[in-house]
Image (cartoon, helix red, strand yellow):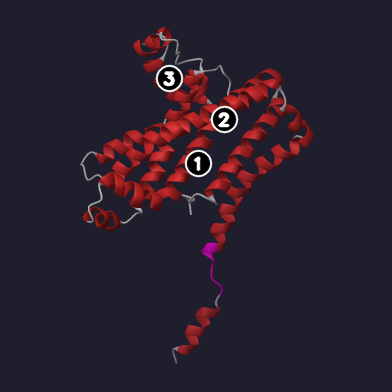
Amino acid sequence: MATGPFRSDLSTPRFDWLTAALALGGVLCLYYLAPLVSLFLSVPPGVVLARTSDPTVVTAATTSLLSASISTAVATALGLPLAYWLARSEAGWTSAVLAVAVLPLVLPPTVGGVVLLTVVGPDTPVGALAGRAGVPLTRSLAGVVLAQTFVASPFVVVTAKAAFEGVPRELEDASRSLGTGRWATVRRVTLPLAAPGALAGVTLAFARAMGEFGATAMMAYYPRTMPVQIWVSFVSLGLADAYPVAILLVLVSVAALAVLNTVASNPWT
């Protein structure tokens, strides 16, 4: 007798929350994609190719690629050890260290530039000493690298930390029990297993460094990076002149996304 009502309940149309979630999320995805599609439709491919040979664009692209590569290398060399320590340490102040490591992520980029200037600006002891040594830390490639490293390195720390935490401690303990030292264990066991996730962090850091504007403009308006060149083109010649360089940066971001979905481990999946 209970079969009838049970069947009736099954046949009653119900609100599909999964479909509703997709519909709402689809609106947000369209909001992401529409401006990008509009950007690519606003400029003929020939104009973009022509702008890539412009000396100012070539210089900006070269500066961005060089500085982003250096800052990513610095972030990797310093961020991976910190990420491993955060993943394995049982110290009570681990949370405080993690908070410091992710602080640049929540600071507005221009504020990041301001706080860096209070340490390495030309009127500070560090900045003055570096200037006398012939290595100015502002209005120079070094200034660009410092700004990019500040804003991009947290991606290495946070993503690599999650990757290291995904490696079972039992594997490291087994290696250590066989007489292998900690460094050898990390190099032979932990790093190979955590490599896809760590590479994701490195890729994100590079993409973030390439796109950094606020802190870079505060620290080193010259030499110009691609984001700074976009701003200069927009202010001096209008929005249309900024389109081609913006498209180049979008292509770099797409390439970084492709890396995340191929050789790296996508941290969002």
Residue 114 image label: 3
- In the picture shown, does residue 162 fall above or below 125? below
Q: Quick one: label 1 or label 3, which is nearer the N terminus?
A: 3
Q: Which residue is mark 1?
A: 203
Task: Let me know if residue 44 appears in the view.
Answer: no
SS for callout 2: helix
Q: Residues within 10 Å of mark 3 (few under 14, many from 20)?
A: some
Q: Which residue is mark 2?
A: 65
Q: Quick one: label 3 or label 2, which is nearer the N terminus?
A: 2
- In the picture shown, does residue 139 fall above or below 104? above
Q: In terms of secondary structure, what is the magenta stretch mainly?
A: loop
SS for callout 3: helix
Left or right: 47 as drawn, with respect to 165: right
SS for callout 1: helix
The region drawn magenta spans 13-18
Amino acid tagged 1:
Thr
The span from disc 3 to disc 2 (Cα, nearest Å) is 24 Å
What is the quadrant of the N terminus in the image? bottom left
Q: Nearer the viewer, mark 1 or mark 3?
A: 1
Task: Let me know if residue 55 appears in the view.
Answer: yes
The front one of 193 and 97 is 193
Left or right: 32 as drawn, with respect to 126: right
The count of marks equals 3
Q: Quick one: label 2 or label 1, which is nearer the N terminus?
A: 2
Query: Which percent across, then down, holds residue 262?
Result: 55, 52
Location of residue 115 by image quarter:
top left
